[in-house]
């Protein structure tokens, strides 16, 4: 089973039972205090191993008019039910060696009685008890699935207690507390389930009964108890309860309930008249009770208290992690069901900006009571109830589709729509490219040709995510489908350029490539995968480069182009020079949170973000595979100071290929050679990060597609829709 399966099960179980677990946890904490409070005033005065039952019985009979029973508590205190010489009947703690009264047995505090009722049945009697039993079972499953996630995450059972790699507070302590408290939690939950099953008579009990009609065999000499071997030898520590004979009649016996057996004993001869072993189910029930309530052990009560309180922390930190994962996910979660939605939004996006706009429209429509279904263009299919289709798509390369839209044009003619649908296409692109919004144009033309689709409004193109253009289009489209619209504001922060000091610049290598190390200012937060926009002097447009974050610096890998103004300017920089730039967050290409493993694929300068990510993974002991394609064997030397492996001695997780001599291999060929490993990793939830040229990306995606189908019998779009593929190409 994969980690994601167990993680989803863990999340689902916790999500459905969270409210009740909070009640169980708070009441559990209060109830765990009861044995601790009881122990603060202990009536244990002697070591029970040293006191014979003969001594205790004689002492009690001397001190009181009548003794009905004697009970030994799990805290080694002795309680006697007596009638005093003044004729008062009471339950008291006694000193078993002399029968002296130590204190009256108090009633339970009303707070504990109230809390017990809430904890056991939510004040709903039998129905509540059933409910609580089910919640206990769910807690058991949550703890077990949590343990399985933990075992897989730590790399096996034996590494369960090895160093915790997570840095995020909630994540880190979810794991640390989890591995210490899972066992107590499993015990609390499973004993809770057992006690519930027992309450509803679902545990078979074969209880034999003591035979009161049996006659004694041994002759009676009327000796005192102190002369009878049975009473002399049996010490109080083995006793749970003694019920005294009702009268002095020879056929009235002592009834002894010991730890594992029950006996009837003749009061004058000490002969065992009848004896039964207690059934295993009864012992199990007693253990369950003690383990669940902490009765009898102050240490265990404290562990129960901490474990119960920890449930609150697990719920809180789990919720925080869930929210964080959702926030970090660069895809919109699928809204509603494709076959019940009126409006279908299909997105074609590579770096996630188009999704931001899709998210805005979806939220607006949902707030107005519309049912909306959102997915990628690759996931195009039939829609039973749809009346409107909206396509939002970027363009890449030579007017090509973004990766998550590459199948749309071939899928379109093959799928039959049950009803006519009105469509609109909005293209996202940049006028800097020769084929401005060309893919959106192709999509629009294909939909026009399809008999199921009729245009609602003509195709529009948005240059560089222009908010002004977006809002004008939004007004038109909203009016056409009859909804209100709220203007769109991208969450991009205001751009402020800053000065970055040059710390290091390498010489050009044989590929005309060099590394530039810049110092970050204290206020700048960024991580590997973000983009730096650098403006060369006397130019208007900044150039974008992917960054590696290494401690307080960022490292860029730059290829000097013959007529490239910015790359030439950067290649001439000296130490302590400054560059004018700003950093843009590129969340969709950050290191995924706690991935099972990662496959890094890049060529040329696309290696840059990975120079910061790989050392991080190695530090955390996480699994990775690294594929890089360069031109010559010497090409990788430039990056060696940042890679914790050497070019000549690649470990099994490092795959370097060279397109020129000696072996003439491209990165996609090496990926194909490693297909078994890649397929297995993908299947287990591994993330793939691709950075480099668009041409390399197209070839790599083609090979991954082939591997996915051939080895896993699954289309690559399946892994894409689960957010496992991250692309940042240029
Ligand atoms: C490597 C690269 C190639 C691009 N090619 C084109 C293109 O051929 N035509 C175009 O109009 N825009 C092109 N663009 C611009 C993107 O389509 C545009 O930035 C879009 O808003 C990105 O949306 P996304 O973040 O959802 O992928 C290209 C952008 C990049 C980075």
Image (cartoon, rainbow, N blue to C red):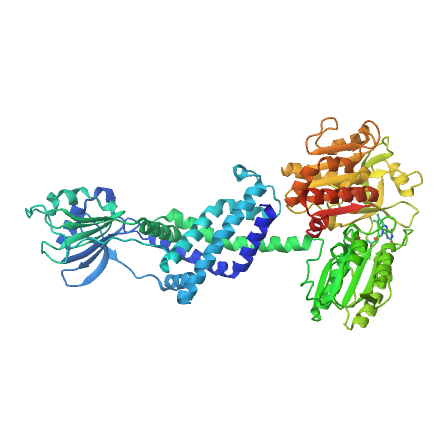
Counting labels gives 0
Q: Residue drawn 75% across and 35% down?
A: 670
Q: Position of residue 567 (x, y in %)?
A: 88, 40
Q: Residue drawn 43% across and 57% down?
A: 28
Residue 525 in sight: no
Could you say which is closer to the camera, residue 584 or residue 327? 327
Q: Quadrant of the C terminus?
A: top right
Could you say which is closer to the camera, residue 277 or residue 331? 277
Q: Report the side of 225 relative to 238 (left or right).
A: left
Q: Position of residue 339 (x, y in %)?
A: 69, 64
Q: Position of residue 685 (x, y in %)?
A: 65, 46
Q: Report the side of 185 relative to 609 (left or right).
A: left
* Whether residue 608 is situated above or below residue 88 in the rendered picture: above
Q: Position of residue 682 (x, y in %)?
A: 67, 44
Q: Quadrant of the N terminus?
A: top right
Which residue is most to the left?
221
Residue 120 in sight: yes
Could you say which is closer to the camera, residue 341 or residue 110? 341
* Whether residue 216 is situated above or below residue 110 in the rendered picture: above
Q: Report the side of 630 relative to 68 (left or right).
A: right
Q: Quadrant of residue 79?
A: bottom left
Could you say which is closer to the camera, residue 83 or residue 131? 131
Q: Report the side of 508 relative to 181 (left or right).
A: right
């Amino acid at each position: 089973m994969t980690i994601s399966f167990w993680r989803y099960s863990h999340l689902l179980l916790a999500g459905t039972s969270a409210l009740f677990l909070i009640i169980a946890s708070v009441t559990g904490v209060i109830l765990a205090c009861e044995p601790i409070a009881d122990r603060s005033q202990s009536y244990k005065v002697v070591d029970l191993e040293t006191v014979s039952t003969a001594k205790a019985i004689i002492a009690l009979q001397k001190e009181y008019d009548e003794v009905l029973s004697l009970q030994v508590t799990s805290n080694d205190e002795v309680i006697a039910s007596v009638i005093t010489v003044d004729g008062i009947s009471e339950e008291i703690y006694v000193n078993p060696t002399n029968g002296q009264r130590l204190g009256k047995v108090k009633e339970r505090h009303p707070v504990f009685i109230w809390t017990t009722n809430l904890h056991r049945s939510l004040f709903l009697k039998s129905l509540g008890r059933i409910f609580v039993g089910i919640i206990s079972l769910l807690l058991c499953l949550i703890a077990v699935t949590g343990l399985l996630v933990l075992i897989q995450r730590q790399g096996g059972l034996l590494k369960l207690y090895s160093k915790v790699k997570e840095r995020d507070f909630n994540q880190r302590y979810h794991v640390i507390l989890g591995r210490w408290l899972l066992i107590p939690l499993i015990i609390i939950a499973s004993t809770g389930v057992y006690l519930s099953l027992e309450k509803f008579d679902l545990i078979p009990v074969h209880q034999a009964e003591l035979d009161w009609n049996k006659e004694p065999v041994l002759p009676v000499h009327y000796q005192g108890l102190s002369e009878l071997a049975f009473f002399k030898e049996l010490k109080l520590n083995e006793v749970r309860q003694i019920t005294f004979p009702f009268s002095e009649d020879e056929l009235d016996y002592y009834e002894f309930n010991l730890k594992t057996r029950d006996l009837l004993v003749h009061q004058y001869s000490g002969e065992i008249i009848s004896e039964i072993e207690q059934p295993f189910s009864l012992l199990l029930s007693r253990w369950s009770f003690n383990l669940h309530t902490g009765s009898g052990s102050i240490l265990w009560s404290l562990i129960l208290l901490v474990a119960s309180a920890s449930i609150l922390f697990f719920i809180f930190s789990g919720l925080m992690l869930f929210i964080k994962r959702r926030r970090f996910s660069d895809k919109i979660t699928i809204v509603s069901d494709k076959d019940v939605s009126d409006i279908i939004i299909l997105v074609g996006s590579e770096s996630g900006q188009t999704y931001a706009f899709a998210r805005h429209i979806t939220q607006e429509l949902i707030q107005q009571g519309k049912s909306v279904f959102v997915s990628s263009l690759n996931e195009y299919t039939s829609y039973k109830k749809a009346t409107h289709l909206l396509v939002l798509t970027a363009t890449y390369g030579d007017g090509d589709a973004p990766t998550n839209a590459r199948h749309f044009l071939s899928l379109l003619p093959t799928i039959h729509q049950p009803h006519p649908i009105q469509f609109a296409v909005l293209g996202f692109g940049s006028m800097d490219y020769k084929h401005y919004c060309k893919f959106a144009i192709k999509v629009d033309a294909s939909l026009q040709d399809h008999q199921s689709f009729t245009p609602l409004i003509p195709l529009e193109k948005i240059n560089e995510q222009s908010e002004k253009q977006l809002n004008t289009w939004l007004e038109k489209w909203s009016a056409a489908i009859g909804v209100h619209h709220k203007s769109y504001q991208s969450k991009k922060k205001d751009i402020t350029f800053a000065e970055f000091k040059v710390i290091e610049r390498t010489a050009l290598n044989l590929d005309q490539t060099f590394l530039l190390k810049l110092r970050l200012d204290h206020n700048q937060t960024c991580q590997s995968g973000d983009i730096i926009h650098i403006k060369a002097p006397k130019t208007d447009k900044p150039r974008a480069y992917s960054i590696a974050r290494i401690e307080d610096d960022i490292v860029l890998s730059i290829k000097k182009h013959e007529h490239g103004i910015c790359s030439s300017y950067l290649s001439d920089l000296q130490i302590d020079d400054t560059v004018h730039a700003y950093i843009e967050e590129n969340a969709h290409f950050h290191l995924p949170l706690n991935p099972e493993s990662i496959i890094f694929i890049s060529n040329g300068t696309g290696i840059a973000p990975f120079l910061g990510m790989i050392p991080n993974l190695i530090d955390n002991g996480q699994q990775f595979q690294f594929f890089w394609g360069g031109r010559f064997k010497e090409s990788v030397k430039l990056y060696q100071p940042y890679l914790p492996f050497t070019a000549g001695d690649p470990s099994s997780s490092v795959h370097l290929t060279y397109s020129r001599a000696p072996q003439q291999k491209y990165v996609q060929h090496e990926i194909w050679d490693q297909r078994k490993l890649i397929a297995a990793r993908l299947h287990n939830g591994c993330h793939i990060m691709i950075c480099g040229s668009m041409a390399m990306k197209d070839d790599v995606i083609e090979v991954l597609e082939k591997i996915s189908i051939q080895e896993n019998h699954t289309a690559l779009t399946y892994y894409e829709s689960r957010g496992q593929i991250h692309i940042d190409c240029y």
